[in-house]
Image: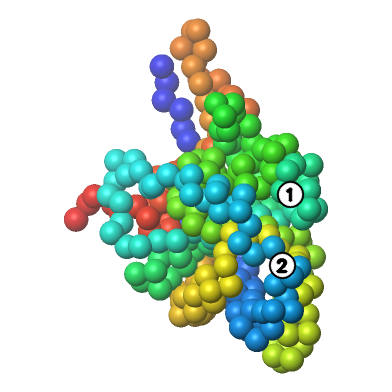
Amino acid sequence: MAKQRERFERTDVPRDNPHRNLIAGIVLVVVFVACGIVVSTAWKRAQAQSHLGDSSLSSSVSKTSSVSDLGYTVSSDTFMGILLLTTDNLDASETGGANLSSAELLVYDETAATGKLVSIPTDTKVSYDGQDTTLAELFNSTGAAACVSPLSTAANLPVTHVIVSTSAVWDEVRSLAGVGVNSLISRATEFLSSIRTDMSSQEILDLAEKVQSAGTDGLSKVDAPMVDETTTDESGNAVSTGYRVIDQASLGLAVGTLVSNEG
């Protein structure tokens, strides 16, 4: 049988101006810093309408598996993964019926204080309850919590926290850059009620400090390398399954969770 060539996108080549590619990562910093300021100074007022400490997301995070070596060496560094899911309907994202606009995973190396923001296509193949589907279809049918463990498995990356929001929220976050503390506090309730996350107020504060420590130089953005999945027919020929899967080894090497055995 002829060997099939895998087709994937390189993660080591910038897609655009490097500083523009860092915007999404810097936005994360703004999100967490804004949350930290708001939570620490106006927690009582904001807590009533917030979606912090979401139990379904917390449960889904606890079901994720550890990183497999895939023939390489698993890094000895400590990593955390923040899954960012953007939807058109925050309320419906809890049980299904919402559409998934984008998925990103911030893989933060706590040991090195660096982070990679991985852009994950919504048509990525995942498996749920023994059935193959796409990330977008699973999100729409079952909700955000159902996507966490399958995506962690599909990417072979850790997912330790989840944030679900709408694109309007990220636009709002961008507009917060450079505003004063009083302005942040006045919008606390509105902001915290517009995201769902498993994190507590203290975890948000801790995360803000960690991501800030990376700084601009310690953050970068990569696209998850994708491979067209194939199977073998009765004649031994490779045929497409119609799914795209993440090249786990290439992605692991790109974000640092896997280390080459050479040297």
Residue drawn at (59%, 26%) of the image: 131
Callout 2: 10 Å neighbours few (<14), some, many (20+)? many
Image quadrant occupied by the C terminus: bottom left
Q: Are marks 2 and 1 in contact (CB under 8 Å)?
A: no
The amino acid on which the numbered mark 2 sits, given as a three-letter code, is Ser
Q: Which residue is labeled 1 in the image?
A: 93
* SS at mark 2 in the image: loop
Q: Is residue 259 above or below residue 241?
A: below
Residue type indicated by callout 1: Ser
**C-alpha gap between disc 2 and disc 1:** 15 Å
Marker disc for residue 138: none
Helix, strand or loop at disc 1?
A: helix
The quadrant of the image that shows the N terminus is: top left
Q: Residues within 10 Å of mark 1 (few under 14, many from 20)?
A: many
From this viewpoint, is residue 15 visible? no
Residue at x 55% of width, y 20% of height: 239
Determine the residue positioned at 48% across, 44% down: 63
Question: According to the image, label 2 marks what residue?
Answer: 50
Describe the colour scheme in one phrase. rainbow
Residue 45 in the image: state x and y as whole percent. Answer: 74, 79
Number of marks drawn: 2
State the image coordinates of residue 225 (x, y, percent, origin top left): 51, 47
Q: Position of residue 22 (x, y in %)?
A: 58, 71
Q: Residue at x 71, y 67 (%)?
A: 50
Image position, residue 130 (x, y; %): 55, 26
Which sits earlier in the primary sequence, circle 2 or circle 1? 2
When asked about the image quadrant of residue 136, the answer is: top right
Residue found at the very far left of the displayed protein: 263
Residue 182 appears in the figure:
yes
Relative horizontal placement of residue 100, taking residue 157 as reference (left or right): right
